[in-house]
Image (cartoon, rainbow, N blue to C red):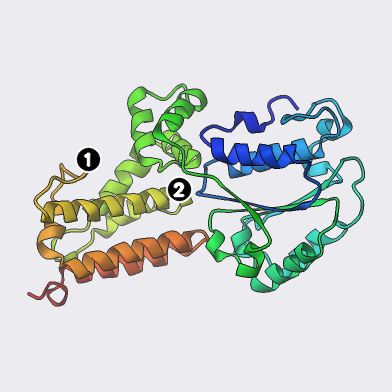
Amino acid sequence: MKGEPSLSDIRGQDRAKALLEGILSGGLSSGALLLWGPEGVGKRTSMEALSRKILCGGDPGFAPCGRCLSCRMPLDRHPDFRLLEPGETPSIGIDAVRDFLRGTLEAPLISPLRIAIVDDAHRLTPEASNSLLKSLEEPSGNLLFVLVTPAPDRLLSTLLSRLLKVRFAPLSETDLAALARTLRPESSPLEAERAVAMAGGSVGRLLFLLDAPPSDPVAGTRSFLGAIGAGGKVDQQAVAEAFPSLSEKEGFEIFLDGLERLLLSAERVAAGLSALPGWSETSLPALYAREGPDFLRASLHDRIGEMRRLAVHNINRGLALEQFLGQIGELFSPKGNGK
């Protein structure tokens, strides 16, 4: 048990923790929970901590006792713990769900409850979702389902209606800075400050930024964006150099953040204001403001939002970038700007 997470260890999620602790103190005996929120904000850590407490057969309270048979047993070997996750596959199909559900209605072997967790639940196929829904509609008195996802809007509405929802919010910059000092004490204050500013409230992205080489992904992404110049021409070598970081999910999200800040900077420049920090020293915001009509900048914003939504489904990032570059080219083409 030493070193394993407890709910008290989760930083920056006081409301979610209070709700989970209230559920535990209310004598939870069955049901279904949904832990949702952005990637890298503590959902899975909370899932593990919650599992440990629910499986514990020892002392009451919000932390597992650490002494009983359940506490001494690794989660992945615990007979009353089931975990379904997609791994490298793009979706969770009905066969995987049927195998996952097999045996869950039996009485717990060594714990007060069985717990069955579906991670990345937004990747359930409709058939798999309906199969899971049948089990939720006929709940067992000794089984708790927990679904975890960054995209609850991708779940079937009938499935959502059966779940008690616990939201995990993006972490504050204060919490991220403290985590940077704790988890990566070797990072310099300047590196930590830069990473916190670009992490978007996510611990996963924070660590990705702190662990990346100095030119990856920050300088690489800036190089990629800077390769988009007048006339919509793109420096393909700069794109190739930047893409290793963009092929990683965290790097791709950071790239989208950079694009959004660039477009917001262009709108600020068009309104006579200064560009956002990080873009004030480049000519791109002024170029986009001068040559890009408002409706095309708006369509680029929409495209970024679409890429964010699709990213949770492991989209082909290369294809998404190719399509986006096509829109960038349209922004500067004679047809796009009316010249």
**Residue found at the far front of this picture:** 26
Quadrant location of the C terminus in the rendered image = bottom left
Q: Is residue 100 left or right of residue 107?
A: left
Q: At label 1, which amino acid type do we have?
A: Pro
Determine whether, in the image, residue 68 is placed left or right of residue 126: right
Residue 37, label in figure:
none
Q: Position of residue 272 (x, y in %)?
A: 8, 51
Name the residue located 78 percent from the left edge and 40 percent from the top edge. Answer: 54
Question: Is residue 245 depicted above or below 311 in this figure?
Answer: above
Residue 22 rendering spot, x and y as whole percentages: 68, 39
In depth, the one of 191 and 48 nearer the eye is: 48
- Amino acid type at circle 2 is Glu
Asked whether, in this view, residue 9 is left or right of residue 289, the answer is right
Q: Nearer the viewer, residue 313 or 88?
A: 313
Where does label 1 land, which residue? Answer: 277
Q: Residue at x 35, y 30 (%)?
A: 193
Per the rendering, the mark at residue 250 is 2
Q: Residues within 10 Å of mark 1 (few under 14, many from 20)?
A: few
**Disc 2 from disc 1: Cα separation:** 21 Å
Quarter of the image holding residue 121? bottom right
* Quarter occupied by the N terminus: top right
Q: Nearer the viewer, mark 2 or mark 1?
A: 1
